[in-house]
Amino acid sequence: MHEMALCEGIRRVVDRAANRPDVTRVTRVRLEIGQFAGVEKAALSFAWEVVMRGSKAEGADLVMIDLPGKALCYDCMEEVEIPERLSPCPRCGGGKLLPQGGDQMQIKDMEVL
């Protein structure tokens, strides 16, 4: 389950950001996840609960924000949103698409007390 490793990386970032005397705990972390990032959200939620134990983020809400898959269509030269990596262009039906986004995962922000 690579979601456990992802959460361990997130914990390192959150721990560094929350390692200040004015921060007693982290209450919410918002995470942007691209449609093609290959992340299983249920597994990520489970891993979150396990990995954050004993940290300032223990019990914090994990909010997952979905980002669409995007591609540049070489037939119509438009950037389009696509539901799957091999989908045709929704504008012109072309099949020459270069992925432009949707495979990233990043912390958008976090709330602390």
Image (cartoon, rainbow, N blue to C red):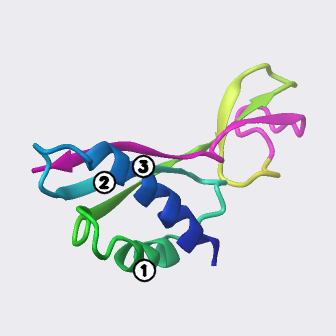
The disc, 1 or 2, on the residue closer to the chain's N-terminal end is 2
What separation in Å lies between label 3 and label 2 (alpha carbons)? 11 Å
Left or right of 7 on screen, residue 30:
left
What separation in Å lies between label 1 and label 2 (alpha carbons)? 15 Å
Residue at disc 1, secondary structure: helix
Please report the residue visible at 80 percent of the width from the left and 29 percent of the height from the top: 73
Residue identifier under label 2? 29
Q: Quadrant of residue 96?
A: top right
Q: Residues within 10 Å of mark 1 (few under 14, many from 20)?
A: few
Q: Which amino acid does label 1 sit on?
A: Phe
Q: What residue type is labelled 2?
A: Val
Residue identifier under label 3? 13
The quadrant of the image that shows the N terminus is: bottom right
Above or below 51: residue 78: above
Residue at disc 3, secondary structure: helix
Above or below 71: residue 78: above
Residue identifier under label 1? 46
Q: Where is residue 9 in the image (x, y as percent from the top left)?
A: 52, 58
Is 92 colored magenta in this rendering? yes
Is 108 colored magenta in this rendering? yes
Above or below 28: residue 70: above
